[in-house]
Amino acid sequence: MNNLSGKASLNNAEVYRNLSFESYIEGILSGNRSILARAITLIESTLEKHQQKAQELLSQLLPYSGNSIRIGITGSPGVGKSTFIENFGLFLCEKGHKVAVLTIDPTSILSKGSILGDKTRMEKLAQHQNAFIRPSPSGGMQGGVSKKTRETILLCESAGFDIIIVETVGVGQSEVLVRSMVDFFLLMIHPGAGDQIQAFKKGIVELADAILVNKADGENIELAKITFREYQQALNYISPATDGWNTEILLASAIRKIGIEETWATIERFKEITIATGVFQLRRREQVLDWMYSMIKERIIDSFLNNPKVKALLPEIESQLFQSKITPTQAVNKIFSVLKYENFGCNE
Amino acid sequence: MNNLSGKASLNNAEVYRNLSFESYIEGILSGNRSILARAITLIESTLEKHQQKAQELLSQLLPYSGNSIRIGITGSPGVGKSTFIENFGLFLCEKGHKVAVLTIDPTSILSKGSILGDKTRMEKLAQHQNAFIRPSPSGGMQGGVSKKTRETILLCESAGFDIIIVETVGVGQSEVLVRSMVDFFLLMIHPGAGDQIQAFKKGIVELADAILVNKADGENIELAKITFREYQQALNYISPATDGWNTEILLASAIRKIGIEETWATIERFKEITIATGVFQLRRREQVLDWMYSMIKERIIDSFLNNPKVKALLPEIESQLFQSKITPTQAVNKIFSVLKYENFGCNE
């Protein structure tokens, strides 16, 4: 009965077949991966009745969540993320950990095939009894991604997964989102200077607690060592992502299983230090507050900008602004003046 | 009749003495610095009737604004900003330019004395007939600063000032604000590595179009040259602030008037290149849109978070959140559910 999770996520008819509230709770708390997968699908549903059930479910499970280390992993396409996550995950599963891998896959907006693709690329890990892999479609918007992924983390934790890996593709903005929902953030890079400068330019290095120079094998070894030293130098110019923790640089070869153990040792040391200083707990509190306030802001601003009166007015206002006919303050006053007795976000 | 501007800004009773709308318009368009100063004070006033008059005034003057290069200058206290701005400003005034210097002074919240302080520290420039110096109190909030400073820039431009210098103290967040209202941003640094790393850590280097290593004189010359080279190296790790322009590094000694001409040549070249590519015009359009949208967001979110019902509810909601009694989504729903028929920002 391995890998039911995958089947469940692929078959919507089956997923929405009635499952009682108690069956969800019991199933998840007992670590049933099939029911966990169905609960995630419920959370991802945009139907109002599913959303209500999902929130109720989540609030019942909240007391059982949180007992994990949440690890974000990013890197450019082709850097070897899936190979690394597979071997890293297998290593942890063999040590007795329960590992959940959540992938945020922007390509899934374009091609539904990527779900099968993800399954294929972590085949061994997907079949391990201690692992759970969930490729989530991003839903086409960043707020959507972050909301569902955060809630999926909580569900996985209440199902007993003590290591949560959130994978993302190196496309810039998604890293900021993932950083806001994990404890530890790992950046994977290629040996060689080009990739290094790219990562710096995108501002991703500032988010990382560790940088893994992957593919440090064969003829790449010397280049990987040069990259390692360049990063050591470059890290002098940026502030660490986590108070009291100096960003670490690691050499690895995911395909040859080199650097796997060292990465885990780094993460364990990170957790130990940041829990001792309270930085770990403080970040989680701040993350949950940020999550709430970002949802509030998103809802009220969306509601404002999607208001039919505002939408009708904006093109003309912007045009007057560009022609220096009105000041920005007058523009703002004009927009608000047509909006008496509107009720942003509060009727929904 | 020099330096009336200073007197006007110090004497509120005089400022609010009735001046007709036409006198403001005529006075400003003819470059009368005393009336310009009074108009700025009008814009800075928080009284509703002053605000309305100020906005009306500004919209009349808008067609005459924009013909300038807007230069932001930042750097740590003691780096020599005022000496540089004085000598740079005098150089430009002697070339026939009209130079307005706007200082954003966070210390003025604490001490009114800083207004006199600013006057003293740029004494020669303040007395030049082509110069206008306006130290603006920050008003204790960042939104306030940016709003008034942006509008002050427009006023100065319509009074014929073709070079606008916006000075700020290196305190981090204020640089982002100033960057959002200028064409060209100059970072001044001390010779020596400590300052270098600080500037990088604060993320200010990424905002700069040029970096000026000041105090490159006497026994500091060698150190300044080392700093120059270190920055050349370090700039490889960040992306330029302006498309199509590579961040320049300059050596200067403000006190000995070294590097003044080179700085101006750099700015002229910057303007020429970015106007040719359209980046200059595009940035100004984006800045005016950002200005409007940031005011909209600020107003609606402030109005929401200051709503008495929301304020009463938030502490309990946050506490339930921290105790894992409710999910963030439920928290958001709870807050919005008490807010039927509220009208954020629209009655004001």
Image (spheres, coloured by chain):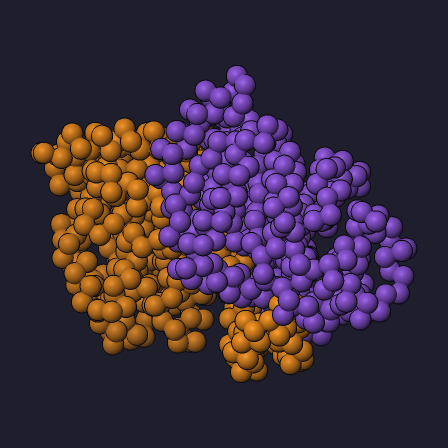
Chain colours: A orange, B purple
Horizontal relation, residue A20 to residue A189: left or right: right
Residue B315 higher or lower than B52, as above or below: above
Image vertical order of residue A189 relative to residue B271, above or below: above
Residue B148: % across, % down = 68, 57
Q: Position of residue B278 (x, y in %)?
A: 42, 62
Determine whether, in the image, residue B52 is placed left or right of residue B273: right
Q: Position of residue B217 (x, y in %)?
A: 54, 23
Front-most of residues B192 and A204: B192
Picture layout, residue A193 above or below residue A101: above
Residue at point 19%, 46% (across, down): A80
Q: For the C terminus of chain B, which image quadrant?
A: bottom right
Percent x, y for residue A181?
A: 41, 50
Tell me, yes or no, if residue A176 can be seen here. no
Q: Nearer the viewer, residue A150 or B246?
A: B246
- Horizontal side of A43 relative to B264 (left or right) equals left
Occupied quadrant, residue A321: bottom right
Task: Identify the residue at horizontal 33%, vertical 36% (top origin).
Answer: A210
Query: Residue at 21% across / 38% down in the picture?
Result: A192
Q: Residue at x 54, y 76 (%)?
A: A319
Front one among B2 and B235 = B2
